[in-house]
Amino acid sequence: MRLAFVALLVLVLAFLLCRAVTRERRSWRRFQRLTATRARQRVYRRWLIESVVIMGGISAVLLLATWPLLGRVLVDTQAWGPVATARDVLAGGVGAGVAAGAAVAFVAALLLPALLLRGKVDEIPAIGDVQALLPRNRAELPYGVGLGVSAGVFEETLFRLAMPALIFGIVGDGPIAFLAATVVFGVLHLYQRWTGVLFATLLGLVLSALYVLTGWIWVPIVVHALIDLRSLVVIPLALGTARQRVG
């Protein structure tokens, strides 16, 4: 069984990394040069379909292959000393208070920078090469919503649920499995340059921690979707660009 997991992991990694280094990067460079709304909509639509079909399809295959390991990798990681200590500290009322405070801080961090800079800059500085991705008018905005939600659902299902289970089936170590999956998640953002890779890797660590500490996959799914929706919806609305009609 371990050899089968190794073969499946190699196949998935080869496909994802090749896609990130070549096809996706070229596609991203072409997209940056597009100016017509209809042309940008076609690319948005293709990316949305690919997110569902490719990321969703790979996730489904890995989940079916590793279903018995999903609980084991989580339990093994939660039993790791630092994680077990953190879960003990957060148990009960303390955890509820920390969760409430973190939720308020998270929402503030998402909204305040965009609102404070509203009307003062033409574009809000972003980490990584992602400015061209932001919708520019009403016609493009729905695709921003779709891309944000699909990334939250399918990327978290793949990199926080399915891939750690697959790697755990090979190495038998939960923390290493989550760390390795996070590194893959970061590298796949190579088209955003190295600042984007670094930020994605750090974000992946946070999202993995949220899943491991809570035991609920919907927590990183919601957080990931909200972060992407901030970039793809809140920022364009704050700048006023997404409220403009197509000229």
Image (cartoon, rainbow, N blue to C red):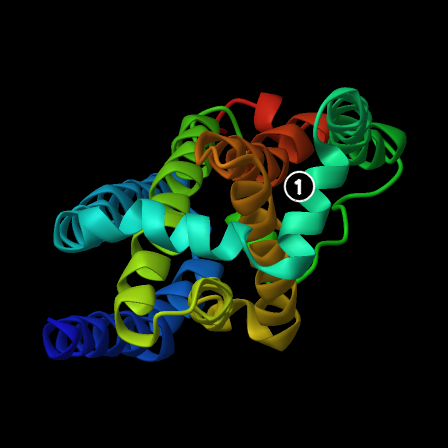
Image spot of residue 29 (x, y percent): 43, 69
Foreground of the two, 212 or 78 = 78
In which quadrant of the rendered view does residue 12 lie?
A: bottom left
Indicate the secondary structure of the residue bearing disc 1: helix
At 57% from the left edge and 59% from the top edge, which residue is drawn?
80
At 61% from the left edge and 40% from the top edge, which residue is drawn? 231
Quadrant housing residue 194: bottom right
The residue sitting at 89% across, 31% down in the picture is 116
Q: How many marks?
A: 1
Residue 223 picture location, percent across and down = 58, 35
Q: Amino acid at mark 1?
A: Arg
> Residue 139 versus residue 73: which sits nearer the camera?
73
Q: Which residue is mark 1?
A: 87
Direction from residue 229 to residue 167 in the image, left or right: left
Left or right side of 237 for 61 = left
Q: Is residue 243 visible?
A: yes
